[in-house]
Amino acid sequence: MSELGAYAKLDFDRVQRRGYPEAVYCAGKTPDQVAGIAEALRDRADAVALFTRAGPEHAAAVLRVLPDAFHDSMAGMLAWPAAEPKPTGGTVMVIAAGTSDLPVAWEATLTARYLGRTTDLVVDVGVAGLHRVLSYVEPMRRARVVVVVAGMDGALPGVVAGLIAAPVVAVPTSVGYGAAFEGLAPLLTMLNACAPGVAVVNIDNGYGAGHLAAQIAAPVPA
C-alpha cells in the first residue's frame, strides 16, 4: 500500500472548523486506499468520518481495519465511530417517492442522523397516488426541513413544497425509463419547480442532501 500522503490528505480539523465530520467518497478509490484512510482514522482518538458510496470491497477493507464501524450496505455508507451523536436541533424528514429511490433516501437519512439530527423516513409516496403523501402533511409541517428523493418525472418535491412552510431539499435519482436520461429529467423538473423554497442537489446525491438538511436543522445559536 502506498503512503497515505500519496493519494489523500485527510481533513482532521473539519469538525472543529465546520462542526461536521470528514467524508470519504469511496467510489473511484481502491480498497487499499480506503483501508489506508481507515488506518489513519484508527490511529487518532478524535477522528470522526463517514465513508460514502462504499461498494462491498470498500466496506470489507474498512471493516478489516475498523471492525466496530457502522456499515449499511443499502446506503453504501460506513461511519466511524459507530455510535450516532446525540440528536440536537430540528427534525429532518426524508421522503422517497418510490421504493427504487430508497437507497439514496437512506443515504440522506443516515447522513443527517450521523450529523446529529433526528430523522424520519417515509417511503413510496410518489405522485402516482397523491393520497399517500397527503396523509403525511402534518408530520411534514412539524419538520424543520424535508428532503424529497424522486426519479422518473421528479414532480414530488414541488408538490411537497406547495404544502408546507419548511424548506425542501430535492434529490433527483437515476431511477426511470429511457427518457429520464439517468436522472437528468427529474433534475430539470426540480430546478424548474413552481413552488418556492426548493433547493436541488446533484443526481443520486443523498449525502449532499442529508448534509444540507442537517445544516438547515441545526440548533439556533443562543
Image (cartoon, rainbow, N blue to C red):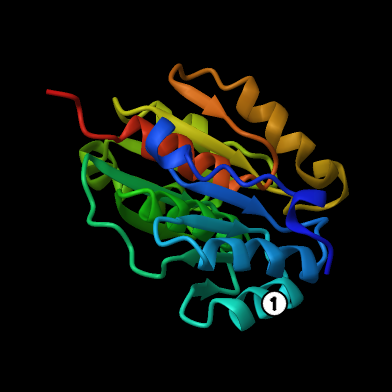
Which residue does the image show at 63% across and 73% down from the upper left? Answer: 62
For the question of whether residue 126 can be seen, the reply is yes
Which residue does the image show at 21% across and 33% down from the upper left? Answer: 219
Residue 65 x, y percent position in the rendering: 60, 78
Q: Observer-nearest residue: 127 or 147?
A: 147
Vertical side of 110 occupied by 155: above or below: above
Which residue does the image show at 43% across and 20% down from the upper left? Answer: 197
Q: Quadrant of residue 35?
A: bottom right
Residue 5 x, y percent position in the rendering: 75, 50
203 left or right, relative to 16: right
180 left or right, relative to 74: right
Q: Quadrant of residue 141?
A: top left
Q: Residue furthest left?
A: 222
Identify which amino acid the numbered label 1 is placed on. Ala
Residue 57 x, y percent position in the rendering: 75, 77
Q: Observer-nearest residue: 72 or 50?
A: 50
Residue 70 x, y percent position in the rendering: 47, 73
For the question of whether residue 127 can be seen, the reply is no
71 left or right, relative to 138: right
SS for callout 1: helix
Please rate how many residues cluster around mark 1, counting C-alpha atoms within 10 Å: few if below 14, some from 14 to 19, many from 20: many
Residue named by callout 1: 61
The N terminus: image quadrant: bottom right
Q: Observer-nearest residue: 100 or 200?
A: 200
